[in-house]
Amino acid sequence: MRSSNPVFSRRGFSRNGYAGFNAPPQAGGAANPYAGNNPYAGQAPYADANPYAGGNPYAQGQQDATQAPPYVPQTRPMTMDDVVVRTGLTLGTVVVGAAVAWIMELSMGLAIGAALVAMVLGLVQSFKRKPSPALILAYAAFEGLFLGAISNAINQWVAPGAPMQAVLGTMAVFVVMLVAYKTRIVRVTARFTRFVLIAAMGFLLLQVVNLLFMAFGGGEGLGFRAGGLGVVFGIAGVLLGALFLALDFKQVEDGIAYGAPREESWLAAFGLTMTLVWIYLEMLRLVAILNGND
């Protein structure tokens, strides 16, 4: 099962139908991109070069007793601690950027510009074959500027206290989904992934149509941003983000189980950050609508 998250779309984070990081390719499946360079896989070309894999290298007849064994770069597999630390760094960068935008009262024009830059950086990283920590942190910084500016605007002009309520709501969704995933109440299967993909495409399509109606027709477009329909649409957005969290948890679990290289933890952090930003924005809009209806 290949993830819908573009961060993981070309990697072997799967147990169903695709090769694992250290597992041999299945019949008709995609080749494992990490099996050939993971020193823990015990496969060529590292099986002979690794001094811990093939016995004492000095015992070989071809090895000069005075010559050191050839250097082989070692890549430690990804662990949960790696994912937690890098996710903390990425989310911390988002928070710092948001705080800067809030304190400086960044204008909405600059905030939209920051959002566009963040979107471009996110797309670039999504299509890169390897994670770039600098690119991921830059994305987080610009995303934070946008979140801080829009949160400050809503707090001042629409619904005072809405950002804090949205933060608490996002944390609650994360905890609930983590518990549901760990207890297997939510099981990520191929059918589950297809459902989330179809729902996400439909949700995004409705948003695009609504924006077009707002741009050319004025007002609230189709009404997805206010009133009862806005509340329903906001709840649907939060639920969809929660389902994407389950997909992210699955990718992290499979990456650790299959011995993904340590650098892949940056991709896990990137995917989790994008999903949490999605949930926060939908939660912020939902809280603003509910407070506005009081």
Image (tube, helix red, strand yellow):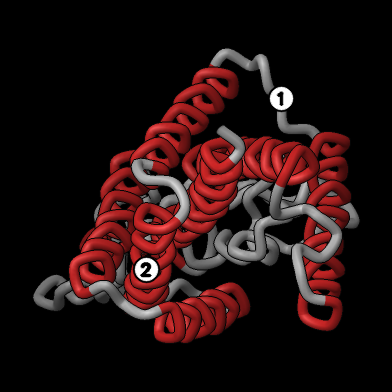
Which residue matches tag 2? 149
- The image shows residue 127 at horizontal and vertical percentages of 62, 78
Callout 2 amino acid: Ala
Which of the 4 image quadrants contains residue 171? top left
Q: Considering the numbered disc 1 on the image, is that residue within a helix, a strand or a loop? A: loop
144 left or right, relative to 200: left
Q: Considering the numbered disc 2 on the image, is that residue within a helix, a strand or a loop? A: helix
Circle 1 residues within 10 Å: few <14, some 14–19, many ≥20: some
Q: Nearer the viewer, residue 24 or 221?
A: 221
Instruction: Say which quadrant the C terminus sits in.
Output: top right
Callout 1 amino acid: Arg
Circle 2 residues within 10 Å: few <14, some 14–19, many ≥20: many
User: Which is more N-terminal, label 1 or label 2?
Assistant: 2
272 left or right, relative to 85: right
Q: Nearer the viewer, mark 2 or mark 1?
A: 2
Q: Residue at x 39, y 50 (%)?
A: 77
Which of the 4 image quadrants contains residue 129? bottom right
Which of the 4 image quadrants contains residue 214? bottom right
Q: Residue at x 84, y 47 (%)?
A: 199
- The image shows residue 68 at horizontal and vertical percentages of 15, 74
Q: Residue at x 27, y 57 (%)?
A: 95
Q: Is residue 116 positioned above or below 241 on the image?
A: below
Q: Nearer the viewer, residue 74 or 42?
A: 74
Q: Residue at x 52, y 30 (%)?
A: 173
Which residue matches tag 1? 187
